[in-house]
Image (cartoon, grey):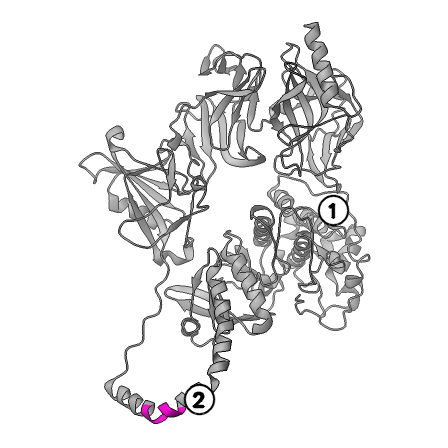
Amino acid sequence: MASSLAFFALLLCFCFSVNPQPFDYPTAIAPTSWTNSPSLPHSVNTLDGATVRSLLLRQDSAGYFLSFAAGFYCFPPCKSFFLSIFIISSNSGGGITLVAPPQVIWSANRAQPVSENATLQLTSQNGLTLRDSNGSLVWTTDVANRSVVGMNITESGTLVLYDINNFIIWQSSDYPTDSLIMGQTLVGGMRIIANSSSTNLTKSNLYLTLFEDGLFGFVESDPPQMYYSGSGNRTVDKSTFMRFMNGSLTMFSTLSNPNKTKILFQLPLATSKQYMRLESDGHLRLYDFNRTHWNMVDDLLKMNNCDYPTVCGKYGICNNGQCTCPTHTGTLENYFVPVDNRQAELGCYAVTPITCQDVNNHLMLDLNNVSYFNTIDLVAFSPTDEDSCKKACLGNCSCKAAMFEWPNGNSSAGTCYTLPDVFSLRNHLLETAHYNSSAYIKVQSAPSPPSTPPPPSNSKVGLGAILGSTFGALLFMLTLISMYLVCSRRREEAQDEDFMEQLPGMPTRFTFEELRMATENFVKKLGEGGFGTVFEGRWGDERIAVKRLENVGHGNKDFLAEVETIGSIHHINLVRLVGFCADKLNRLLVYEYMCNGSLDKWIYCRDGRVSLDWLIRFKIITHIAKGLCYLHEECRQRIVHFDIKPENILLDENFDAKVSDFGLSKLIDRDMSRVMTGMRGTPGYLAPEWLTAMVSEKVDVYSFGVVVMEILSGRRNLDYSQTEENCHLIKLLEEKSKSNGLSDLIDKNLGDVELYKKKIVNVMKLAMWCLQWDSTKRPSMLMVVKVLDGAMEVETSLDYNFVSSIPMISNISCLAPYDSELKE
C-alpha cells in the first residue's frame, strides 16, 4: 500500500509538472479565486487532446489510482472549458502514465462554456461564482448570506460548500447532470439529463426521472413522450429516492412506507469505481474501471435499439438498426429528406415545412407496417377506424402524425394515437407484435401552379400566321445583327443560372412570369426597403410576399446571400423562404405572408393602429431573441444578420415575431471570433465596433438592445419629431439609467404599467447589457434567451456610457432624418 501511494504521488508530480503540490488537496478556504490558465498548479494535456486543470483533488483511499478532481475541463479540440467534476485514472505498470481519459461526471456550466482566463471565486457571501474572461456572470451556487467557510470534494466525488459548523450549505449531487456516481442519491422529481453528444455538454431533450413507482425515461416535447417505464404510477414523491450502490440501483421510501425498497437494477460488483451515464442516444450505461481503461459493463434499460426515441432522429424509421426517411409508394414526390446523407441516424426533415396558415394543403402520408418508438404513454382515441384516425390529426394543427393500431381482421375497432412531435419510428413486425400498425405522417404539399391560359382561337392563329410571315424577314435580320451581343449576355446569365441551380437545399424556383401573375402585375405594395419593393401575391391557396430587387447590379450579390442563407435554415422565429426567381436579370424572393406586417407599424402607434400591450411586446422580444440565438448558436456556421431593426421583424396573425431580410447577412466560421467587413446596416442600430470594421455576432446583440428599447418606449431610437435633447433614445437611456429614472421611458400605451413596471424595467436592464460599448461585455443571444425565460439574471456590473464613448452616435445630428441602409 505504501509503495502504491508513493507511485501515485510520483505520478501526479510527473503529470502536473508545473508548480508541483501535494497529490491530495481536497479543500479550499474562502475567500479565494482561480483563473483558468496553464499556470494553474495542476494543468495536464491528456493523451486524447483534452485539457484538465485541477483545483481540488481527492485521492482514492482504496488505492485504485483513481481520484476525484474538480476544476476546468476542455474537450478536444480544446477551445472552451467547463467547470466540472471528473475522475482521473492512472497506473504505475509499465511506466507512470495517465492511462485513460478523465471521465466528466458533473458540470456547472453545461449550456455556456468559458474561455481562457475565466475566473472562479469562492467567497463567504456568494459561495462559488464563475465569470467568463469578459467578466460576464456564467454560473453561481446562489447561496447568498449563508456564511460559506470553505469548499471540499468528498471521497464519493461530490463538491460541497460548508459553514463554520461543517454543515453542508450546497452540494453538486443535488444538481445532477447526466451521470450518477457510487453512493449518489436521486430524490423523487430530480432529473438526469443527457448531453447532446459525448463532447458537447449542452442538455439534450432526453432525461430520466424518479417517480413513486420507479425510474421513467422521457424525450422532451409538449407534452413529454415516455420511452422507458418503471411501472404505472407517475406521482412525484420527494420522500422516495434511489441510491447507486455497489451491486444495485435501489429505490427507497422514507415516509409513505419506510420498509418499502425496490431494486431497480441489479448491477455487477465494482472492481474499482463505477459510474452510470444517461447518454445522448437515451441508453443508461454502467462503466467500470479495470486498472487500465474504462469498460461499459452493462446497458441498464435493456430495450431494443429501435425503442429509443432518437435512434433515427426525427421522422427516421428504424429497421434492425438501419435508418431511412418516410416514403410513399403511391407518389413520386419526396416529402422528407435526410438531415445528412452520410449520417442517417440524424433523422429527416420535411421538404415543405408544415404551417397552420396553409391547412388546405395538409395531407397524411400513409406508412404501412410502421409503428412508433413507444406508445406506452400516448393519449389514445379508441375504438375508432383508420379514416377517423387520419381526420383527428388533420383537424388538429398541433398534431404532426397519427399512429393506428388494430387487431387482425378488424380495422374498424382500432386504437389511434396522435403525436405533437415525431421522433423515431420503427418497422412493425406483425408476427411478433400480433397486431397491425400504420403511421400517418402529416405533410404539406406544394401549392399547385396557376392554371395554363386556354389556347388561342382559330382566327387568332390565322392572324398570327399572317403577321409572322410579314415581319419574319425583318425579325430574322435583326436577330443576325444582335446575335453576338445576345449570346454574350446569355453566357453571363447562364453562369448565374447554373450557380443558382447548384445551391444546396434550394426552395421552389419560380419564373418571372409566374410571379408577375401571382402578384397581378406587382400592384399591391406591402413595403419598400433598401434592396427593393415587397408585393402581396397568391400562389395557389397560399398568400405570399414577393420581394423584387430593383438594383440588380448590387442586389444580385445580396440576393444570392439571402437565398443561400434563408434557404438552408428553418426556425419558427425566422421568416420562411418559399422560393426565388432567377430569370434573366430579374431577381425576386418569395416569402411566407405575414398578415400583421412589420413591427415598426405597431410599436410607433402610427396610422391609428391599436397599441400592443406588455405581454405581446414581451412575446415579440422573446421571439426575436430566439431567432437570433438560432442564427448565432445553432447553425453550422454563425450567421450574423447585420440589420436588426423593427422594419425587419415581421408579425403573423398571432403576433408571433419572425426575423426577416437577410440581404446583408454574413457567415462566420466557428473558429473565427471576428471578421473584417465593410460597414453595413442602418444608422441608429450600428454597434460602435463598426468604426474598426472588425465585427462579430455581437453587432446583432447591440442592434437587438436598440430594438428592445424602441419596443418598450414606443418610439424610434432617432426620433426627429422630438426636441434635439430628446431625439436620441439611447442617449436618453444613458441619462435615465444614471438618475434611476428608467420608468420614465416606458410607453404609456403598454397597458397597466404599474402592474408590470418591475418586469419592464428588468427587460430595459437586459437591453442595457446588450448595449455595452465593449462588445465582449455584451451577453450572447443564448444568455439573452435565458434571462427572458427566467433561467438567468441580468449582469449588474454595467457601463452606463452607451453613447458618450461612441463618436458615430454621439455626434449624430438630430436636425435632419438619417435612416437609409448602409451596404458594403
Of 177 and 185, which appears nearest the observer?
177
* Among the 4 quarters of the image, the one containing residue 658: bottom right
The numbered dot on residue 478 is 2
Dot 2 falls on a residue whose secondary structure is helix
* Among the 4 quarters of the image, the one containing residue 455: bottom left
- Quadrant where the C terminus sits is bottom right
The numbered dot on residue 777 is 1
- Up the image or down, 595 lies above or below 314; here it is below
Q: Position of residue 392 (x, y in %)?
A: 31, 46
* Among the 4 quarters of the image, the one containing residue 22: top right
**Which residue: 42% across, 90% down?**
477
How many C-alpha atoms fall within 10 Å of the one at disc 1: few (<14), some, or many (≥20)? Answer: many
How far, Cα to Cα, is label 1 from label 2? 66 Å
- Res 387 seen here: yes
Q: Is residue 652 magenta?
A: no
Q: Position of residue 211 (x, y in %)?
A: 47, 24
Query: Who comes first in sequence, dot 1 or dot 2?
Result: 2
Q: Position of residue 728 (x, y in %)?
A: 75, 63
- Quadrant where the N terminus sits is top right
Q: Which residues are magenta?
A: 469-474
- Up the image or down, 78 lies above or below 811; here it is above
